[in-house]
Amino acid sequence: MKSSVLILALMLLCPWARSFAAGKAEDVRKESETSFNRLLNKLTEEYEKGLQVPAPAARPEQAQPDDRYWVTVKAVDKYERTKLLEAGLAIEEIRPGSVSGTMHKNSLPLLSQKGFVVESRKTLAQYLWEDVKDFPAADSAYNNYEEATAILKAAAAKNSDIASLFSLGKTIEGRDIWTLRVNTSAKGEAPSAKPGAFYIGTHHAREHLATEVPLLFAVWLLDNRNSPEIKKYIETLDIYITPILNPDGLEYDIRGGRYRMHRKNARVNADKTIGVDLNRNYDSWWCTAGSSSYPGADTYCGTAPFSEPETQAVKRFVEARKNLKTLMSYHSFSDLILYPWGGKDAQVEDERDRKVFVKMAGEMAAVTGYTPQLSSDLYVATGDTADWAYKTGKIFAFTTELEGGSFYPGAGIIARTVKNNVKAAVYMLSVSDDPYKIVK
Ligand code: 0X9
Ligand code: ZN
């Protein structure tokens, strides 16, 4: 806002400012031609709108106990509506044949006593909060599962000659783990001999930037399919992007229009606590360090390696694709590019592999401004994706800890983080034909 006022004032005063502004307008026009930029612009606009949204009120049950219900009752005319008011229903919505509104729980029996038919009822808290299935208003620029799915479907449909969408598997709550594949000769899950690169977002529910980065990278890649560099990668590689590995957790984290600081998936454990830490559930020295066997813990490793459908889906997929050369798993936050080992306090044993890991992490750190680091130097934690992928398939697998300084850094950071990490993601593509070429 402030900068546009400044540009307007300058335009009136100086001719060079006018040509600068014209150039800017040209840039904006060019940018809006691609859907990647359209998505980035949209989220910036939504972010700015979000800034004007007042902070959400305290949840009703926290502020004071509220014994009211939200009820929908059959009512055909004004006479019935008047009777409902007299029974204690505060009418909020009128439709042909029914009305909805609030009513104290003690008055509810009056409805059937007076012969009314109740179509539905729920506590007011449920109506106000639990039914909201989206990000808090100020963060509405972030994509929830449904929005991300729509973006992936549209991108695949628009580029159906080279892109396809398939489900890696189903989650505990039955959601599909959508994966966008870019390959000029193979579709869906059909095998390919081309060297492969695999990007995975959001193992951890509350790390929402880790959805945006791979999701928008997928869109960017397809938008730029005709640039000579990207064209070459698309023609020669087998590229997979799974922006949300843990959609159940993501949706749980935002349910009610407020954040729950949820990290795990949606497994209901034997003791009724919720969730297994998917980044402790892989079979790499499973549950021996840096993870907890207590189900309530945020780092709970599960009942066995790959006890969870989400990690099983990754296992099945990776084991069936011997062509995968590189893998990136996005997390937040800490500005780091991490490489194995993470489960033990050591570098990988193979010297040539170690050189590749160090070089790749260094290059990706250079383009993002993050720090390259041995994963176990952050802390030793067993059962993570990268260790398992390297152990099992010699895949050069990394964990990016995105920027932001908190799990909920606001929507203003999305565009910059995505642009930053697109560079690293493209670097990963550039070596995925043969990662060893960089140490020859
Ligand atoms: O602890 C994790 O799973 C990752 N950090 S996060 O804050 N996103 O939860 C880091 C994983 C790095 N891997 C190991 N140190 N093993
Ligand atoms: Zn994480």
Image: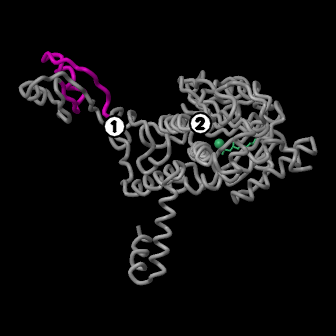
Q: Position of residue 353 (x, y in %)?
A: 88, 43
* Magenta highlight range: 98-124
Mark drawn on residue 343:
none
Secondary structure beneath label 1:
helix
**Mark 2 Cα shell of 10 Å, populated few (<14), some (14-19), many (≥20):** many
Q: Are marks 2 and 1 in contact (CB under 8 Å)?
A: no
Q: Which of the 4 image quarters holds residue 86?
A: top left
Query: Residue beneath label 1, please?
Result: 128
In the displayed structure, does residue 78 sit left or right of residue 397?
left
Compared across the picture, whether 21 is left or right of 166 comes to left
109 or 432: nearer the viewer? 432
Q: Position of residue 101 (x, y in %)?
A: 22, 32
Q: Position of residue 377 (x, y in %)?
A: 79, 49
**Which element carries disc 2, helix, strand or loop?**
loop
The residue singled out by tag 2 in the image is: 244
Residue at horizontal 25 percent and vertical 20 percent from the top: 119
Q: Residues within 10 Å of mark 1 (few under 14, many from 20)?
A: some
Q: Is residue 290 visible?
A: no
The question of residue 7 being in magenta is answered with no
Q: Classify the position of ligand 1 by quadrant: top left, top right, bottom left or bottom right.
A: top right
The single residue placed furthest to the left in the displayed view is 79
Which of 381 and 29 lies nearest the eye of the viewer? 29
What amino acid type should be assigned to the residue bearing mark 1?
A: Leu
